[in-house]
Amino acid sequence: MIDNGGLDIRSKSALFIQFMAWIILFDHPACHGALGLMIMGGGLHMGLSLKQMFSKLIPLTPLFIMIMVFTGFNSGAGFIHPENQAPLITLWPGGVLTRGGLMLGATFMLRLVNMVVLTQILLASTPLDEFINLFVKLRLSPALSFLITTAIRFVPALDQKRTLIITAQRARGVDLDEGNWFRQFKNRVTIMIPLMVNAIVIADQLSMALMNRGFGYRKTWTPMTRLRFRTVDYFILVFSLVSLVSALVIRYQGPIGNLLSI
Amino acid sequence: MSPLPLFHTGWFMPENWSKNGQSMGKALDLSQVSFKYKGTDTFALVDVSWSLAPGECAVIMGPSASGKTTLCRCLNGLIPQALEGTLTGDIVVAGKDVSFFRTQTLAKDVGFVMQDPEAQIVGRTVFEDLAFGPRNLLVPAREIAQKIPEVLSLVGLAGYENRSAADLSGGEKQRLAIAGILAMEPSILILDEPASELDPAGRADLYFHLDRLRQLKKLTLVIVEQKIEGIQAMVDRVLVLEKGRVISQGRPEDLKHLWAQPGIRPGIPNRHTDSPPRDTPACLEVNHLDFGYTPETLVLKDINLSVFPWDFTALMGHNGAGKTTLVKHLNGLIPCGAGTILFEGKDINRFKIKALARSVGFIFQNPDHQIFETSVEKEIAFGLANMGCSKDEIARTVDETLEKTGLESFRSRHPFTLGKGMRQMIAVAAIVALNPRVLVVDEPTTGLDAAGSSLIMDLIQGLHANGTAILLITHDLSLAARYASRLVVMGQGEILLDDHMEKGLGKTDVLQRAGLLPDSSDFSPAKAGALHD
């Protein structure tokens, strides 16, 4: 079992929001690198392995490479610092690799990585029940709350199905990586159609299973745990608020904001 | 369906109310029930009348598409409350007319465990999952917390509260699904083929717990099953359906003559009994294969296995013995690490995916993982086209395969408009068309009736007669004894037994250890034969 650090879901959400604010507001890759280290450290502290945190990112590797390449050849006109506009390599007229372009590419990549890992940590360290309790506190209806949390559960179930379908298609000779991009796209149709059919079947069975278990019997249900604030939660709330305000001030009011831009 | 909208909530209905007042004292009572799903022309149930007393155990049997699952859905109110269609007749369950109560309200009295346990598990941990039902019924949290250990011990999962639901074995998930329903304390429990994916020992264990529950809690049990062997002692009533109609009902001892009918029990065995010639070189050789999904736990330990042309081998073992992991190595679905696998003397790591797929075919349990084309003939043609066959060759092979499999009249139909048995047949046909040298078949008959199973197995036997080596994974000892000439038994990642079928069936200690026979059984080859009679 993963230790959730004993934090209340509300303080976890506050931490999540302030990290997201830093991730979205700033463009400098060093800033994202530092955020990434903090997030990773938090994940390790909560008992997650590096594999648990980063395994979901492996399929996105080609996307990361494309981001780096395409953004690297950015014209550079929008960069604040002149040294970032200077061309490093010119491959063809207009095809200029700039330092700023590479930095922006790294920023986009790290931003995605940080967002995915942060979400992964939140989901892995928080029981569904706590999410539902939070939604109830936010006065969302239990049905809507359960819809959201079931969706969170539905994705891993579908992912398992995807693995089974890929195995079945490979067994009949479908090589997903064979041929040019059009051929590869065509090969993926053999995965997509069974996946869609299975998604409908899973959804249909899940809805019947929920009714069998009395879901919707009344407009409310029994809360199993109460949200409870401890001292550390107050500290984290204050920290998150200060951090959020600092992020906004630094970004829009002052010289450090420029330093954290490209 | 309801005359008064308020009745849907169940608030204004007295507990033992029924329209005709005849159902008092009966656990369930169906009177002239017919049902047709919306958008279909044929009735799924026709004029079904049936009743059961409280505390009785009934088994519903019949071939595929005979209406078994539809009847279960009627009993817990999914029909007519959630699934649209035309319903006539009266259905009164636990004193409530299902037309007037929502499924959620009926769930207090009627629990329904569906066929696929995975689809019913909604919690991340066992505790979360078990609490879900009672929470919906507004049972106080303290009561739920007290009830869960009790329910877990009833299904043999004591101490599992904090286990991750995803990490449970197939049998444990099945028992968790049952526990999830029991936690709501219904008086009637309906189970749709609860043991279809369990090994024989797991099946015996499940029914032991169900029988105990019935005695302890005075539960009324309604169980959909393809076979009644091993559970006759606990069954009070049997209902046999065919094409939606009740063709027979009564006590199990009065209906013994029905077990041998096609569609209810397998027919007379017609196994090819010749010993495989071992003078020819093996087409597949596995040498010292070790494998683990994690470095700490080996799933396969020093596996040595040779598959010869003309072999018809049954690969058996308990759930989690490593059978599927082993066969996935044979056509490169899991790369071979420690050890070697040779196909006709060549390391399979040197084969391309396509070439290996043509040499070592693989039929999976669930046809819906592979079907994607818009017609039956295109689905069969896909593998051939993917292998680079010419148009003429594809057309000729598709025609031959359609004829051989009896799918000719469905050639232009969309596969997903056909039933599961038919889709399984299409999946088999698509692999048969490739004419592989070795064919691995993983539980091809799960969820199919005896007639559907025979159709699939006869097709595989036909391929074997043409020289293809067959490796059949199954939990069904009688199916294996009927078709296979060689028995390989796995347990805890090791090969425990590799022998001719007749000799293998005599080694009851190994079969028991591998979960293929319940512990108490005094199984013998003679009894294996008797299973077919």
Image: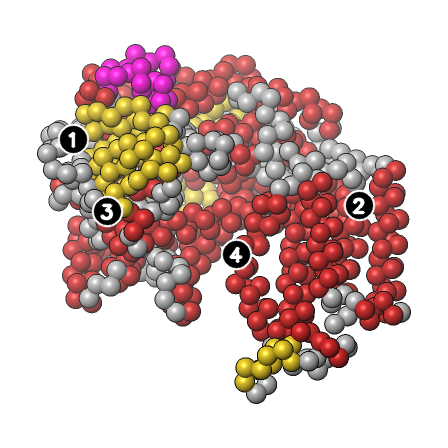
For the residue marked with disc 4, what is the amino acid?
Pro
Of badges 1 and 4, nearer the viewer stands 4
Q: Which circle marks residue B271 in the picture?
A: 1
State which chain disc 2 sits on.
Answer: A
Mark before the other along the chain sequence, 3 or 1: 1
For the residue marked with disc 3, what is the amino acid?
Lys
Q: Are marks 3 and 2 in contact (CB under 8 Å)?
A: no
Q: Nearer the viewer, residue A226 or A16?
A: A16
Q: How is the image coloured?
A: secondary structure
Residue B424 in percent (x, y) is at 31, 46
**Left or right placement of residue B426 versus residue A192 in this view:** left
Q: Are marks 1 and 4 on the same chain?
A: no
Q: Which circle marks residue A59 in the picture?
A: 4
State which chain disc 3 sits on.
Answer: B
**Badge 4: how crowded within 10 Å, few (<14), some, or many (20+)?**
few
State which chain disc 4 sits on.
Answer: A
**Residue A201 sits above or below residue B495 on the image:** below
Q: Residue at x 31, y 27 (%)?
A: B495
Query: Whole-Å distance between the Cαs marked 4 and 2?
Result: 31 Å
For the residue marked with disc 1, what is the amino acid?
Arg
The residues colored magenta run B505-524
Q: Secondary structure beneath disc 1?
A: loop
**Can residue B87 be seen in this snapshot?**
yes
Mark before the other along the chain sequence, 4 or 2: 2
Of badges 3 and 1, nearer the viewer stands 3
